[in-house]
Image (spheres, rainbow, N blue to C red):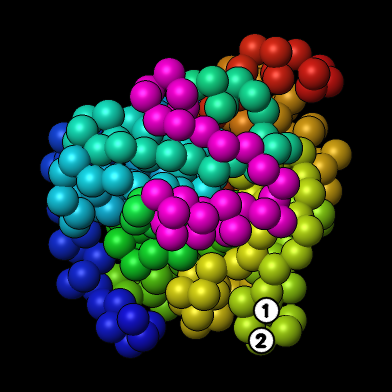
């Protein structure tokens, strides 16, 4: 599908599908930064969107709700995920009576594999570089249909519901900061804001230095892959998505990078303020507190905390 065919009407219809889904997608809160104990090095009117409180613990349920609504129940689906998409995929598979399998990078926490399996979906762990090969084998040999975890129109349109929701809570934000893995969420949010008329809103994607596929794609003017490695495993896909890349090039101001150490510190700072956010969900926050986003002083800023799926054992390894 071409970028021109991604219209506001398409996104509005997807939002209606998402918010009426039997999967119970939540309208998550957005709180002023000033009402928290979090540090804010640059004075601005910042808000935090709490997708870590979303059903299944992350924004992924939005895209999954739209994907499953547009496919027959009782199907046979395979996907690849480091955990968050896989959890929402498994939750939806159980609800719709579908047979599912998740191919996971072997770097993902074992606790996430266990959780997905507890919902009745099979898990296969492979090196990140082998994810697509494993998915293709399931499609060719076992007759699964592939549901992509970030490069899929229905998914991106479902994620766009988050951008539309932000506008209800804070009309005309000047800066919006979003984590980026394969680019599905970043593309959905940026497209929703621009097509809704907020063309002056600057949307920034944030990636870890060791998993910067979209950042490199912007430099090379095409979606590229890399041997992505980061503590934020959910932001370390094998490549940037083709559709997300095209939408991000059109609607995203810039992709910036943060270090794993900065992500570590962000998880700890958020936890200290009473917010349980996983490394992948903390990248946008890390970008703000480490001054990676230009010209935010005095601006209306939204920072999306995209997921909170982190176990007690994993949390115990973070400083602070």
Horizontal side of residue 269 vs 73, given as left or right: right
Assess disc 1: are there few (<14), some (14-19) or many (≥20) residues with their C-alpha within 10 Å of its C-alpha: some
Assess disc 2: are there few (<14), some (14-19) or many (≥20) residues with their C-alpha within 10 Å of its C-alpha: few
Residue that appears at 72% across and 84% down: 220
Question: Where is residue 296, by image quadrant?
Answer: bottom right
Q: What residue is disc 2 on? A: 221
Horizontal side of residue 148 vs 295, given as left or right: left
Residue that appears at 67% across and 43% down: 126
> Can you give x and y, in whole percent of width and height, for residue 76 in the image?
29, 45
Q: Is residue 36 magenta?
A: no
Which portion, as a residue range, is magenta? 116-142
Check the picture and name the quadrant holding the N terminus.
Answer: bottom left
Question: Where is residue 167, by image quadrant?
Answer: bottom left
Circles 2, 1 touching at the beta carbon (< 8 Å): yes
Return the residue nearer the eye: 275 or 99: 99
Q: Is residue 76 visible?
A: yes
Residue 189 badge:
none
In the figure, 90 relative to 41: above or below?
Answer: above
In the figure, 8 relative to 166: above or below?
Answer: below
> Can you give x and y, in whole percent of width and height, for residue 181 in the image?
60, 55
Residue 218 badge:
1
Return the residue nearer the eye: 208 or 43: 208
Residue that appears at 74% across and 81% down: 219
- SS at mark 2 in the image: loop
């Amino acid at each position: 599908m071409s970028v021109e065919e991604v219209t506001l009407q398409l996104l509005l219809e997807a939002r209606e599908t998402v918010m009426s889904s039997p999967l119970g997608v939540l309208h998550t809160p957005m709180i002023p930064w000033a009402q928290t104990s979090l540090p804010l090095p640059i004075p601005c009117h910042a808000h935090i969107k709490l997708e870590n409180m979303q059903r299944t613990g992350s924004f992924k349920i939005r895209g999954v709700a739209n994907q499953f609504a547009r496919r027959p129940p009782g199907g046979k689906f395979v996907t690849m995920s480091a955990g968050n998409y896989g959890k929402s995929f498994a939750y939806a598979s159980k609800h719709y009576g579908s047979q599912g399998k998740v191919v996971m990078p072997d770097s993902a926490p074992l606790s996430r594999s266990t959780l997905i399996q507890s919902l009745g979906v099979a898990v296969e762990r492979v090196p990140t570089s082998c994810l697509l090969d494993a998915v293709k084998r399931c499609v060719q040999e076992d007759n699964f249909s592939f549901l992509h975890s970030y490069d899929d129109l229905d998914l991106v349109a479902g994620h766009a519901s988050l951008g539309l929701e932000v506008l209800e809570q804070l009309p005309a934000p000047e800066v919006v900061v979003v984590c980026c893995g394969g680019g599905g969420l970043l593309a959905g949010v940026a497209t929703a804001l621009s097509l809704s008329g907020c063309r002056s809103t600057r949307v920034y994607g944030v990636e870890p230095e060791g998993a910067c596929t979209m950042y490199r794609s912007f430099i090379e003017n095409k979606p590229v892959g890399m041997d992505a490695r980061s503590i934020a495993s959910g932001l370390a896909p094998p490549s940037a998505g083709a559709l997300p890349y095209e939408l991000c090039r059109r609607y995203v101001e810039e992709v910036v990078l943060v270090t794993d150490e900065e992500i570590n510190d962000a998880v700890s700072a958020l936890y200290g303020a009473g917010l349980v956010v996983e490394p992948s969900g903390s990248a946008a926050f890390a970008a703000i507190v480490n001054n990676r986003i230009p010209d935010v002083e005095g601006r209306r800023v939204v920072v999306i905390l995209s997921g909170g799926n982190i176990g007690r054992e994993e949390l115990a390894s973070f400083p602070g």
